[in-house]
Amino acid sequence: MDSQPRLRAWGAAVLLIVTAAHTASCVALLRAGIAGLLGGRRPTPRLLGLAGALTAASLAAGVAAFPADGRVVPGTFHLGFPAGAAALLFCGALTGAATPLLPARRLVIVVGLGAAVAGVAQVATGNPGRLPWAVNYLLYVGAAAFLYRSGVWFLRVMWELDRGRDVQARLTVTSAIAKTRPATGWRRCARRRPRVGCSG
């Protein structure tokens, strides 16, 4: 066994800072995505790039904070369980935040590509595991994407219903005002002399 610590203090501090920034960027991206889906302004490319860069930084910080789990062979690279769990968490958060921006087909493609990258990384680094990384990625990130997608769909349906009720209420008020407005011009003449032509 290797004598490397399971948690590096400096790595944990960096991980906490990057996690806070990553969380803020994902929340901002999700909020802007929902606003764009409901007819508002869509997220800027800068915000998308920032969220992606912070996700990559978070993955690196997770590896730095949790270098191994005690079973690493000297001279080889081994990703411990905490670092793997952190990677799933960050990737799932980014995928969920980007859900309002992606059609269903593209969302499936994004999750599938992420799982493929995870599987290739496991084979390239020779990391063992009871479940392949690709399966873990599909289970966690796929579930997160589905839940986010369902929530966004439900929110959009409720927004459409509320907007429909608002339009109906405005039409009702307009119709009521038109009915109570006094008759003028040819309408007043028609009411007084229905059988005689009116000139204005």
Image (cartoon, rainbow, N blue to C red):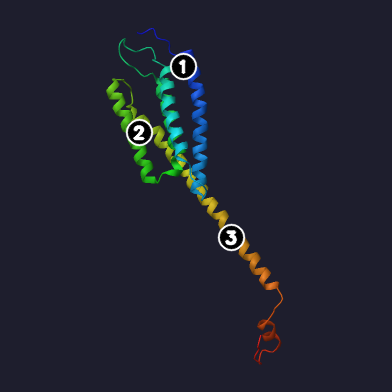
**Identity, as a three-letter code, of the amino acid under mark 1:** Gly
Q: Quadrant of residue 73?
A: top left
Which residue is drawn at the image coordinates 58% and 60% (left, top)? 167
Residue 37 as seen in the image, left or right of residue 128: right
Quarter of the image where one finds residue 144: top left
Q: Residue at x 51, y 22 (%)?
A: 16
Residue behind mark 2: 114
- Dot 1: element: helix
- Callout 2 environment at 10 Å: few (<14), some (14 to 19), or many (20+)? some
- Of discs 3 and 1, which sits in the foreground? 1
Left or right: 177, with 101 as reference point: right
Q: CB atoms at circles 2 and 3 under 8 Å apart?
A: no
* Residue highlighted by disc 3: 167
Q: Which residue is mark 1?
A: 11
Of residues 14 and 100, the one nearer the viewer is 14
Q: Residue furthest front?
A: 46
Q: Amino acid at mark 2?
A: Gly
Amino acid type for the residue under numbered disc 3: Val
